Amino acid sequence: MQAAETTPPQATEASDRRSVLAALVFTFVTNIDMTTVLTLLPVAVFGGIRVAPLTFSLALSIQVVASLIGGIVVPMVFRGVNSGWMLSLSALLKSAGFVALLITVHPPGLFVFAVLAGFGRGVSKVAVRVLLTDASVEKDRAKAFQLFFVIMNVALLLAPLAAEAADRFHVARHALVLLLLLELAGGAWAGATARRLTSDTGKAKRLSVGGGLGLLLRPGPVAVSAYTLVAYFAMGFVMAMFLLYDEVDPALSGYRELFLSFEPLALIVIQLAMMPVLAKTGRRAVYAGAAITCGAGVLLSFTSSLVLVLLGLALFAFAECLALPQSQVDAGKVVSKEQVPAMLSLVTIMTAVGEMAGNVAAGWIVRNADGLLPSATTSAMAVAVVVLAGFAAAGYGIDRAVSARGVA
């Protein structure tokens, strides 16, 4: 898989490995912190209080909306600021959200956490991707993003295990304090390391919202945006449904933490084992395979069989391995080099919108199951069909757009 041209030629032909490492370390820290807290909230008791499932679903949606706003507003306000400062700001915002939870998990504290942590998460999503793009030269960029997704999923694998241990030993508040300190330390170190980059390298690019939305008049950016939207809708939907799994399928609810850890574990194993093969797979095969395995994976993930659920999660993980690195690279191929920052801005917006829509859809299905809607599992299977169709159509559009531009 070849990396896309996403920045002007750099003065050196070597990547800045310390800055790449800073981005990867921060990715691990912030994902394990946020995912551990989100896994704990629906099941753990904080000061004698347990968060109700529907309240948690609302907080999850607020967090995603705040992430979208943070990803747009902060880079515009702090135009040209080094990405290292953005990482530190992100850590401070999320840490402030953790403090709000330590004060109370009643809706005021919970919603303050959702806003602050979501805002910080939106900032970090932009900053980490900008830093990886700027710190790696073209020939190393695809590998850097592959490592980014592997590291992120290692954190997603470990977080439910940490949450299960904290809940079992009734140390949820102590775990929250530890995560707060880890977030502050990770943000301080990664930010300081990233700030070593000088001149244009490492500077946060302005989110060109107007230019980004203007790209939606062209088929290539539309296809990439739609693909990103569907991909992150599916990821947000599956994650939220399994976070609320006690309400989704009480018969298998005892395996909730297993399911939450299994999908990122499968993704890591598949990506590490098949990285050389995936790198040589043609674009058309990647997008076709992603559509089939994602649709089948979501469908099987909500059956009543433990074995089929695990198989479905493995297929869903395989779809992520195919779809995310390829679409990240192709985002830079459907536009000119000058338009890449606007395209990345648009991808960031679609990421947040898709994840938010997936969270909201999961909460709505759980709330209306066996009433306005069929059972939660049956409704999730219907969503799987929509996801498959969306993936197939958007992947076909990207392939046509890249081929039309004559980019390999």
Image (cartoon, grey):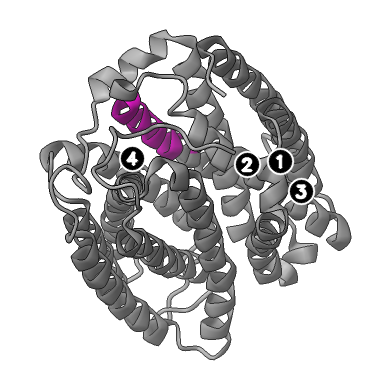
Q: Which disc is residue 365 wearing? A: 2
Discs 3, 4 touching: Cβ within 8 Å: no
**Front disc: 3 or 2:** 3
Q: Check residue 262 for magenta coloring.
A: no
- Estimate the spatial distance between the alpha carbons at disc 4 and disc 2, rounded to whole Å: 23 Å
**Front disc: 3 or 4:** 3
The magenta span reads 340-354
Instruction: Give me the residue at 11% from left, 39% from top.
Output: 77
- Name the amino acid type tagged 2: Ile
Which residue position holds label 3? 315
Depth check: 374 or 127 in front?
Answer: 127
User: Label 4 crowding class (10 Å Cα cut-off): few <14, some 14-19, many 20+?
Assistant: many
Q: Is residue 200 visible?
A: yes
User: Label 2 crowding class (10 Å Cα cut-off): few <14, some 14-19, many 20+?
Assistant: many
Which residue position holds label 4? 68
- Estimate the spatial distance between the alpha carbons at disc 4 and disc 1, rounded to whole Å: 25 Å
Q: Position of residue 128 (x, y in %)?
A: 33, 52
State which quadrant residue 400 falls in: top right
